[in-house]
Image (cartoon, rainbow, N blue to C red):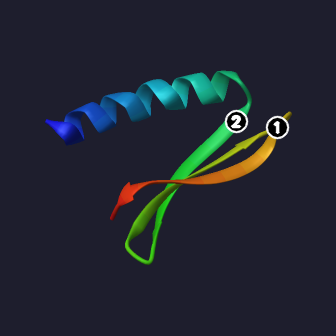
Amino acid sequence: MTRLIDRVLARVAHKETVDAGCSRYEFCKNGIKYLRMCCKDEGCYTNPIGRC
């Protein structure tokens, strides 16, 4: 169930960020999953979002 919710949220967030001129991607490093988001007006930031 959690994976389904994550996929739905990812789709919604992706649509919103594309509209705002942002790109986002997720990656794993040292067992931690991160979200990297870059927006043309705000720059980039990386946040931990869970485990890989």
Is the residue marked by circle 2 packed among few (<14), some (14-19), or many (20+) residues within 10 Å? some
Q: Is residue 10 above or below residue 29?
A: above
Residue at far right of view: 41
Q: Which residue corresponds to the image point at 32% horizontal and 28% vertical from the top-left?
A: 8
Please tell me whether residue 26 is drawn above or below residue 41 in the rendered image.
below
- Which quarter of the picture shows residue 19? top right
Residue lying at 82% horizontally and 37% vertically, measured from the top left = 42
Residues packed near mark 1 inside 10 Å, few (<14), some (14 to 19) or many (20 plus): few
Alpha carbons under labels 2 and 1: distance apart:
9 Å
Circle 2: residue type = Cys
Q: How many numbered discs, if any?
A: 2
Q: Is residue 10 left or right of residue 52?
A: right
Would residue 6 be found to the left or right of residue 13 on screen?
A: left
Q: Are marks 2 and 1 in contact (CB under 8 Å)?
A: yes
Tag 1 or tag 2, which sits nearer the N-term? 2
Q: Which residue is mark 2?
A: 22
Q: Amino acid at mark 1?
A: Glu
Q: Which residue is mark 1?
A: 42
Please report the residue visible at 31 percent of the width from the left and 37 percent of the height from the top: 6
x and y percent of residue 15 in the render?
A: 54, 24
Front tag of 2 and 1: 1
Residue 31 to residue 46: above or below = below
Residue 32: % across, % down: 42, 66
